[in-house]
Image (spheres, helix red, strand yellow):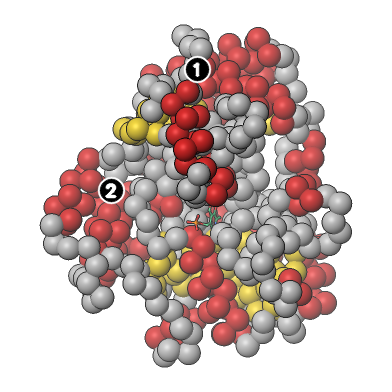
């Protein structure tokens, strides 16, 4: 059913919000251009989310494929998790001491994630990559790092480079994505191209004496969804081992989503350190750096400083314990993969049947479609060839039919354990209708 969308209350709240909060929202990625008066990018104001659905203040209801940018792996307001959290609420919120659940969660992580010999908690993905890089530098005694073009690792000073090179094409070399980063930081970062076997080999051979750590999203999840080419992660591992560089997988998006043990399990490549957040809490704010004992030892000895008032707080821990318990026991991944494959194949078939130049790519629990004559994307540069305007129109028409994906073509479509077969059917029907009218 096609519905004329009304976002009046969200617009009004946005105008009010901007009087107090710069941009009206506390994260840039939440602002949409499509849905509002052209003078302000707007965030929707959400009233509630439940199962696979999200409801805004204007009374609109959507099947949610953004899922909080990925964390909601089980579904919104997942009762088994929330019941446990509700009980724990009455035991207080933060102790400046330990709680037993930290050990239970660490044991669960260790039993699921190949590289997790030791675990250290923090609150956000940004914090986790900051800590992992610090450990990497401390372990090797080398200050510089490698990151890849189009990979996002949070907003701290050491990684906010070339996350979106197209946004400032006129610049050459490494793109700095924010003012206020000290000038000394930029020269500590090397940018490499994803899936470029020769490029990364040469870069490491030429500069390995300065490079302490290499960080990557093992599946690019901030550029649609671009998996590693066969052998690419293996090559990174080999080069890092030869040249004494700490290999860090930023599994903030892939972790507990693409497989029980993350991308490292799926591709059979065990990094030295890995960062987890998002799906670790099904929406509760929790993150972790996990890795080899010999590296994590630096935190144990105090050579690497790490702290945090809220790290491993009992609420996040109880949530994580329940989430991981469910992910470990139930066939969540079989379902996510089934649902995602049906959706990906369905969309691809619609492109074919409607004679549209479009591709669907990525992993079933984290994928995206693009309007492009290309057959696949293997790196960030390829994305220059997408029709983002057409994507934006499709996204808006899908909203009218009760299906919500992100406005940003680079943000993947996610699914959850709560998405139902009826949601899938409705989504594909809506997609078919929209592609038919817009082509
Ligand atoms: C791969 C990756 N790393 C790190 C982060 C930063 O996480 P947070 O927003 O929790 O700080 C994100 C956020 O989307 C991410 O996608």
Measured in 3D between alpha carbons, the distance from the residue under mark 1 to the one under mark 2, in whole angstroms, is 37 Å
Residue 326: mark: 2
Q: Is residue 3 left or right of residue 375?
A: left
Where is residue 313 drawn, in percent x and y? 28, 65
Q: Is residue 83 left or right of residue 226?
A: left
Where is residue 391 drawn, in percent x and y? 67, 27
Is residue 314 at least partly visible in the picture? yes
Where is residue 26 drawn, in percent x and y? 49, 50
Above/below status of 380 relative to 291: above
The quarter holding residue 103 reads bottom left
Does dot 1 land on a helix, a strand or a loop? loop
Where is residue 72 drawn, in percent x and y? 39, 43
Q: Earlier in the sequence, mark 1 or mark 2?
A: 1
**Residue, far front:** 19
Q: Is residue 201 left or right of residue 361?
A: right
Residue at mark 2: C-beta within 8 A of ligand 1: no
Nearest the eye: 432 or 61:
61
Residue under the point 48% across and 23% down = 7
Location of the C terminus (image quadrant): top right
Neighbour tally class for label 1: few under 14, some 14-19, many 20 plus, Cα within 10 Å: some
Nearest the eye: 11 or 45:
11
Does dot 2 land on a helix, a strand or a loop? helix
- Residue occupied by mark 1: 5
Marks 1, 2: nearer the viewer: 1
Residue at mark 1: C-beta within 8 A of ligand 1: no
């Amino acid at each position: 059913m096609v519905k004329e969308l009304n976002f009046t209350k969200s617009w009004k709240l946005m105008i009010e919000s901007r009087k107090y909060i710069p941009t009206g929202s506390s994260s840039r990625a939440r602002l949409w251009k499509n849905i509002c008066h052209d003078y302000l990018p707007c965030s929707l104001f959400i009233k509630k989310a439940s199962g696979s659905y999200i409801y805004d203040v204007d009374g609109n209801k959507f099947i949610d494929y953004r899922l909080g940018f990925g964390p909601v792996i089980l579904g919104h307001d997942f009762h088994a998790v929330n019941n446990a959290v509700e009980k724990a609420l009455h035991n207080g919120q933060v102790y400046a001491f330990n709680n037993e659940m930290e050990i239970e969660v660490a044991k669960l992580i260790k039993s699921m994630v190949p590289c997790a010999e030791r675990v250290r908690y923090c609150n956000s993905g940004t914090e986790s990559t900051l800590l992992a890089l610090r450990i990497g530098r401390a372990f090797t005694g080398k200050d510089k790092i490698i990151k890849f073009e189009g990979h996002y690792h949070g907003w701290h000073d050491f990684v906010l480079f070339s996350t979106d090179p197209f946004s400032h094409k006129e610049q050459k070399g490494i793109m700095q994505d924010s003012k206020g980063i000290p000038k000394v930081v930029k020269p500590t970062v090397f940018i490499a191209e994803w899936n470029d076997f020769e490029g990364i080999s040469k870069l490491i051979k030429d500069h390995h004496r300065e490079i302490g750590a290499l960080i990557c999203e093992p599946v690019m999840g901030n550029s649609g969804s671009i998996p590693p080419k066969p052998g690419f992660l293996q090559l990174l591992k080999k080069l890092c081992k030869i040249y004494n560089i700490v290999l860090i997988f930023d599994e903030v998006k892939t972790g507990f989503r693409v497989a029980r043990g993350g991308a490292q399990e799926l591709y059979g490549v065990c990094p030295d350190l890995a960062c987890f957040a998002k799906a670790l809490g099904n929406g509760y704010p929790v993150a972790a750096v996990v890795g080899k004992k010999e590296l994590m030892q630096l935190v144990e000895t105090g050579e690497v400083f790490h702290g945090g008032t809220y790290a491993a707080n009992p609420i996040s821990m109880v949530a994580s314990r329940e989430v991981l318990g469910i992910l470990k026991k139930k066939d969540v991944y079989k379902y996510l993969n089934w649902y995602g494959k049906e959706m990906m194949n369905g969309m691809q078939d619609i492109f074919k049947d409607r004679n549209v130049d479009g591709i669907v790519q990525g992993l079933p629990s984290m994928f995206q479609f693009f309007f492009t004559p290309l057959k696949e994307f293997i790196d960030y540069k390829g994305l220059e060839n997408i029709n983002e305007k057409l994507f934006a129109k499709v996204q808006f028409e899908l909203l009218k039919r009760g299906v919500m994906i992100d406005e940003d073509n680079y943000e993947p479509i996610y699914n959850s354990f709560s998405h139902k077969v009826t949601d899938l059917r409705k989504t594909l029907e809506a997609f078919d209708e929209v592609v038919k009218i817009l082509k």
